[in-house]
Image (tube, rainbow, N blue to C red):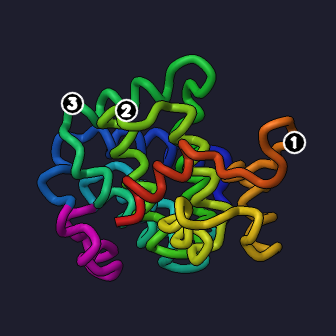
Amino acid sequence: MKFKEESNKELSTSLKETISSSELSGIGTEIAEITIDSIMNEGVLRDFPIVGALVGVWKTGVAINDHRFLRKMLLFLSESSKLSDEARKDIIEKLDEEDYQAESGEKLIAIIDKLETGSKSILLGRALALFGNKIINKDEFWRVSFIIERLPMSDIIALKEWKETDLNKVFDIRKHLYLSVGIGWFVLNASSTGFCWQERLCEIFAEHLLE
């Protein structure tokens, strides 16, 4: 999916406004069950800035090839809505400060766009909730988001058993994928030789994201 620059800015602003909206918590549990057709036909979700902006972009003919992006966005919002209003407003302030500034909404939209499954959108929403609840910090959120985007879902699910798994014995393709996203690294020193897990990131997935 590709958006014109002006549409990207509108979607970025709209996403941040939606996450901060006090109305999101009231409808969050129903988001995943609402059909795309009902949204296009003036459904209740059209009141949320990001949904209204997406439908507007859709109608202008900018290249949105299917309904998958909106479905992934709704699943992401469904998880995000489980945070308190105060926590969600705090998230936006923190994601927008310093290095990320106004880029946070654009980064989230770009990540959601690249996710190949709805289950990954749910994980990303859970990661945002972890950040809002101060279980992970900002850097960890972006690192986890990168991993969710890049790893196949089967390799993410396998992280549930990381403590019982010797990374040196993981088959090569999966091991190289883990190394490429920072889940593991190669250690060569007096006390250890071989592939080792990045324990903090593994714990985030196994203990918090993969229910």
Q: Residue furthest left?
A: 26
Q: Residue at x 33, y 36 (%)?
A: 132
- Residue stretch in magenta: 29-45
Q: Residue at x 59, y 34 (%)?
A: 103
Q: Residue furthest top?
A: 98
| Residue labelled with disc 2 | 91
Residue 36 within the magenta-colored segment of the rendering: yes
Task: State the SS at label 1.
Answer: strand
Q: Amino acid at mark 2?
A: Ile
Viewer-nearest of labels 2 and 1? 1
Q: Determine whether 209 is above or below 161 in the image.
A: above
Q: Is residue 187 left or right of residue 43?
A: right
Residue 202 within the magenta-colored segment of the rendering: no
Image quadrant where one finds the N terminus:
bottom right
Main structural element of the magenta stretch: helix, strand or loop? helix
Return the x and y of residue 99 as percentages of the image width and height: 62, 22
The circle on residue 188 is 1
Q: Determine whether 47 is above or below 128 in the image.
A: below
| Sequence-wise first label, 2 or 1 | 2
Q: Residues within 10 Å of mark 1 (few under 14, many from 20)?
A: few
